[in-house]
Image: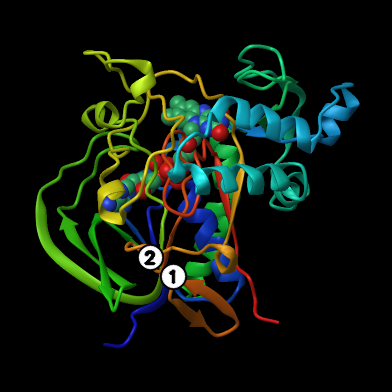
Amino acid sequence: MSNDTDVIVVGAGLAGLVAAAELIDAGRRVIVLDQEPEASLGGQAFWSFGGLFLVDSPVQRRLGIRDSHDLALQDWLGSAGFDREEDLWPRRWAEAYVDFASGEKCSWLREQGVGFFPVVQWAERGGYLATGHGNSVPRFHVTWGTGPGVVEPFVRRVREGEQRGLVTLRFRHRVTELTMTNGVVDGVHGEVLEPSSVERGMPSSRVVVGEFTLKTQAVIVTSGGIGGNHELGRRNWPKRLGEPPKQLISGVPDHVDGRMLDVSGATMPSAFCPGHRRCGWMPVVSVCRFHSSPALTRSGLSSTSSLPGMTIRGSCSISASSNVSLPCRGPSRTLISRVAVSRKR
Ligand SMILES: Cc1cc2nc3c(=O)[nH]c(=O)nc-3n(C[C@H](O)[C@H](O)[C@H](O)COP(=O)(O)OP(=O)(O)OC[C@H]3O[C@@H](n4cnc5c(N)ncnc54)[C@H](O)[C@@H]3O)c2cc1C
């Protein structure tokens, strides 16, 4: 069967928008699918405070805050408590992310038009010490315009891509399956939900009116976290925290349902802690370099599918969500995910 597009992105939150924007720049054709109506474009990030994790930034330096890559990584590892075999990718994610946050992240965001309030906040400060959990120095850079200010540049880039015919946004399309051939993800299958006119962030109907199947060379899953799904939260509750509370509350829209966790065969990081932020909520821009991410297929295989000019393996999940880790990435606690598509030299 021929492909419907070069890449399918599942989820039109901030991570999906950033992924699509970067793919457009690489000249790829993209279909972005989302279960919610168009009114919710941008997902949770629209509601967010827009605080971004930057390390040794110009604003920090101006304020006399001494920060460094090594200190930030130590803080992260101290918070995350990676202690299981399946924490390999979360750990790699943390390392890659701190590289990014102490490297090009700030200048890259400025290039997008993102500006920062000139005072750095100290969110998730944890135990105050670098050997414990939490940020040992202030790193929470608040975006001008808060959440909507972070979302806007990426919506603009995706809309421009739409006008150029490179991107198609399909709302009310809920993915229920990653299709595979010979162990390699080659598309998605799902349900078309009935039209909905609810306002941004409001619960929308789940009445199914049809089905769809789309074929592609690469699938990127950017479906957010599980914070709106208490049952899933309890199921993934860390043993060391004892019995999960009987009553949980959510601070996220209903679409943060974690359903794609099972669909994509993802795992939770050991530091997952719904309902509070013991692990240090570190807003970050995440980088997923496809060519260096093995085991991206659902079955853990890493057969490579190539696009002209780049290499992408099977499917890759990126989460800008606050509490879920998917197969090739860590406990992302992220606000923005940036996809760096590696071009073949
Ligand atoms: C009130 C609030 C304040 C916050 N403040 C901050 C902050 O200051 N700093 C910070 O870093 N973070 C903050 N966060 C967290 C941050 O906003 C999120 O972690 C981030 O926006 C998640 O982005 P995402 O693209 O990964 O996921 P989402 O925004 O959840 O987007 C995922 C999208 O995938 C879609 N989807 C899910 N499953 C399917 C499926 N099966 N088929 C099709 N579509 C699907 C959903 O409908 C959704 O549109 C805040 C969050 C909230 C709610």
Q: Are marks 2 and 1 in contact (CB under 8 Å)?
A: yes
Question: Can residue 39 be seen?
Answer: no
On the rendered structure, is 211 left or right of 17? left
**Residue drawn at 63 percent across, 70 percent down:** 342
Task: Classify 10 Å Cα crowding around label 2: few (below 14), some (14-19), many (20 and above).
Answer: many
Can you give x and y, in whole percent of width and height, for residue 125 in the image?
A: 64, 16
**Residue drawn at 70 percent across, 48 percent down:** 100
Quarter, ligand 1? top left
On the rendered structure, is 309 left or right of 198? right
Q: Quadrant of residue 341?
A: bottom right
**Residue drawn at 55 percent across, 39 percent down:** 335
User: Label 1: which residue?
Assistant: 302
On the rendered structure, is 15 left or right of 200? right
- The amino acid beneath tag 2 is Thr
In the image, 318 versus 81, the foreground residue is: 81
Disc ID at residue 297:
2
Whole-angstrom CA distance, mark 2 to mark 1, is 6 Å
Can you give x and y, in whole percent of width and height, for residue 19 in the image?
A: 52, 59
Q: Choose the circle earlier in sequence order: 2 or 1.
A: 2
User: Can you say which quadrant of the picture contains the N terminus?
Assistant: bottom left
User: Can you say which quadrant of the picture contains the C terminus?
Assistant: bottom right
Q: Residue furthest bottom?
A: 2
